[in-house]
Structure formats: C-alpha cells, structure tokens
Amino acid sequence: MTSIVLGGYISVLNNHVINVVIPKMMSGLGTDVVTIRWVVTTYMLANAVVIPLVGWLARRLGAREVYILGLLLFTSSAVVCGMAGSVAVLVVFRALQGIGGGLIMPVTMLLMLDLYPPEKRGLGTAIWGMGASCGSLTGIPLGGFLAEHLSWRAAFYANLPPGLVALLIAVFVMHPSPRERHVPFDWWGFLTLGTALVALLLAVSNGQRQGWDASPIVALFLLCGAAFVAFLLIEPRVATPLVDLGTFRSPQYAMAIVLSLIAGAMFSGGPFLVSLFLQRLYDFSVQQAALIMFPSSAFLVLCTPVAGWLSDRLDARLLMVVGYLSYATFAAIMTFADLRFSALAILILYFGRGIGLGLSYPVIYPIGISGLPAARGKAATTLLNLCITLGGALSVSILGALLEQRQLIRQALLAETQHLAALGTQRALAALQALAVQLGGALPPALHARVLLARLIDREALLLAFNDCFGFFVVICLGAAGLSLFFRRARPPA
C-alpha cells in the first residue's frame, strides 16, 4: 500500500509543482507564454487519452506490470525534462511523462481494490486518496520554494525520491498480477474517445485566450461532439469495449460519474480561485498564499482516512451531505469577501474545503461500483479517474473565463455610477486630488485623481468578480448534496 500511496502522491505533486514554476521555466528557456503553455497542455492531453486504456492494459499485461511501466515512464521522463535545453525537448518528454502519470493513478486504484475486500473499501479508498491529498498539500509550497531558491529544473527532480521508492517496492515486494492473454483491443473506441477528449481539452485550454466564439474553438467543440456521438454508437457493438457502457445501468455508477466531475472541480478549482484571490487582491506571493491554504489541506489529509473508516460503518450519505454543505458554506461566505477579511479569516474559512473533500471524496469510488460485479467494477474505476481529471481541467477553464467576464461586467456597472456631476464622485475626486498632490508626479493633480479613481474601480470590479466566481461552488456543491441523498451502497450482485 505504501507504493500505491506514493504513486498517487507523485502524480498530483507533479501537476502542482510544475504549474508554480512555469514563469521561471519561461524565462530560463527564453520563450513566451503561448509556447510554454504546451508544457502543461501536452501533459494533460497525454494523461487524459491514456486513462481509458488502463483497464485493457491491466487485463492484458497485469495491473502490477502496468504500474511499474507507468512509474518507469514517469520518473525517467522527469529526469530528461529537468535536463531539457529547449522547449521542444521539454514538450516531447512532458507528453511521455503524461502517459506515465495517466497509467499511475487509475492502476493504483485497481491494485487497492485487490488489497481490500468490499466491506473495507471505504477505508482502502481513503488511504489511496491520501497520496493525492498529500501531493496537493505539498505541491504549491514546494513549487514556490523551488522557484524562489533553486531552479525550475529542480521541480522535475523532486519527483525522483518518492518515485524510485514506489518503483522499488512495486518490483521487489508486489506480487505479479493475473493476465488475460487474448483480450482484443477496441481500436475504434480508442480513436473516437481519444479524439473527443483531445478536442475538448484543447478547446477549454485555449478558449479563454482565443475567445469562445473563435472559429478554431467552435470547430474543436464540434469535433468533440461528433467524435463522442460516434463513440456512443460504436461501443455497444464491440465485444470487448474500451468503456463498458452497460455499467451506466447501475444508478450508483451513473451518479458517481457526476460526483467525480464535481470532486475534480472541488479539488482543482477551489485552490485555483483562492490562490488567485490572495495574489491579485492581497498582493501575496505564491508561498504566502500556499501557507494560508496549507492548514486546510493538511486537515484534508487527516480527515480522509477517518471518513473512509466511518463510511464502512455509517450511512455514507450523511458524511457526503455534511461535506458538500461545508464546502458550500465556505464558498457562500467568500461571495461576500472583501479586503477587510484578514488572512487568518480566510485561513479558517478555507477549512470548509478540507472538510468538504475529506468527507465526500473517499466514498465515491466504493459506493459507485458497489452495484457492479467485481470484474466490471474494477474496470469502471478508470472512467471515474478520468472524470476527476476532466472535472479539474474544466473547472479551472470555466473559472478563468468566468472571472474575466464578470470583471468586465462589474467594471461597466461600476463605471455607470461614477458621473462626474454626482456629489459622491466629486468628493471622491477631491480626496484623490489631495492625495495626488502629496504623491507628486508628471500628471496634473486633477488628471491623476481620475486615474486613481479608475484604478479603484478596476480593483473593486475584480473583487466583485471573485465574489461571483465563488458562487459557482455554491451551486455545484448544493447540487452534489442533493444528488448524494440518493447515493447509497447497493447490495453486492449475485
């Protein structure tokens, strides 16, 4: 189990650390933002495309062997990425690292299911999830430290010690997994689903920069829709499909798919929004923002195994409802947040995320597959992993676009209220003009005062835009709480 937890840890740690050191990487390699984005995008694309293959690979090669292959690809590619002298080399080996990462997370779930019987899978899932939680916990502060004190190359080498330990345990301690030698590969299913995923992720990654109504983005969404429809038409006619659509006849599994998408948004979207909030409005550094978010993430790591243990003994729906309501409460209060909130207040409020994920996330997997036969249930977990990945990617893109859109709307609404003839505006300009005289500068005090007023409006518009974005989590968490009332463990199939 140690190797399984370490595998999940390095997979999540890698994403957080690399995202933090991107600016240093850009200056070190002498490239621009558009080019350096491919370092993240190629990893994400390779990760998403390979996840649906894990079920077939585990049957054909054995789960332990696939895990070893994933660790070898991931760690060796990390070494080459750290040594890369050009963006082209870095992007190529980030794609290989993405393939390794895409193998690691789903196959560790399959290995965990072999270790724990059905009545203890809540605890097993919780322990498995601790790896991902610890990666999220340490990723941002470690990335900030490496970016500030060392080099962006050290961010890739940070994966090596835990990766090598996980690899050695897998090779010398784990027992070989059973294989099925003659399992045909669903080529058409892979091509259609892979095309749909690549098109979707490219569209959501570039939509905010190019514009959601830009021709390339619209074309990618249309391609995604056409490929996905083709996938749905092909899969029922395949003897050994890449994704067993029959699992969706289980109400628990269908609800688990939706809850996994929401869990991905809660995992990735929350830290993304809070970190931006602290950096752009409070002018905190990455490390300072990480320190404020650290206690909640640490609590999440501690809460996860306890919730898993309780879910094997209590009605898990109670845990999930409390968890989702805790996250919704944190988000609801943040819809009224302003600069009068102290850093300590935000630190305490952010515990709502730790409680929310700690109580809700560990029970999605065991309950989601509880109504499926053992063989189908193990294969079905790979799609749940894919949904968490997609939920995280989609939420970050949606929140980024929503933040920009709401800031423009709020800015326009605030500007409409600032008529120069209005008494309040005149008083504000008078106060700002007095300040401008004290500050000095090349601009005339009257003009300087108007510039300062415009900046105040921009900052207030950004604050209100953040308030609006936190409402996104209120909506999805309340929806998840309502759905979880019907999410109960099914009787084991006969």
Image (cartoon, grey):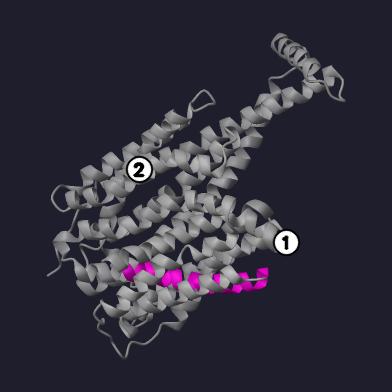
Q: Quadrant of residue 105?
A: bottom left
| Three-letter residue code for mark 1 | Gly
Q: Is residue 78 left or right of residue 213?
A: left
Please determine whether, in this image, residue 202 is positioned above or below residue 442: below
Name the quadrant of the N terminus: bottom left
Please determine whether, in this image, residue 199 is positioned above or below residue 344: below
Q: Secondary structure at mark 2?
A: helix
Residue 211 in view: no
Foreground of the two, 236 or 492: 492
Q: Which residues are magenta?
A: 86-108
Residue 48 in view: yes
Residue position marked by numbered label 1 in the rendering: 30
Q: Is residue 90 left or right of residue 270?
A: right
**Which of pointers 2 and 1 indicates the residue nearer the eye?**
1
Q: Is residue 286 left or right of residue 108?
A: right
Q: CA distance from mark 2 to mark 1?
A: 38 Å
Q: Quadrant of residue 376?
A: bottom left
| Three-letter residue code for mark 2 | Gly
Q: How many marks?
A: 2
Main SS, magenta residues:
helix
Residue position marked by numbered label 2 in the rendering: 354
| Residue that appears at 37% across and 81% down | 238
- What percent of the width, then of the height, locates residue 51? 42, 70
| Residue that appears at 46% across and 72% down | 75
| Residue that appears at 68% across and 60% down | 28
Q: Quadrant of residue 285?
A: top right
Is 100 inside the magenta-drawn segment? yes
Q: Earlier in the sequence, mark 2 or mark 1?
A: 1
| Residue that appears at 37% across and 54% down | 134
Mark 1 nearby-residue class (10 Å; few <14, some 14–19, many ≥20): few
- What percent of the width, then of the height, locates residue 115? 20, 69
- What percent of the width, then of the height, locates residue 196? 52, 68
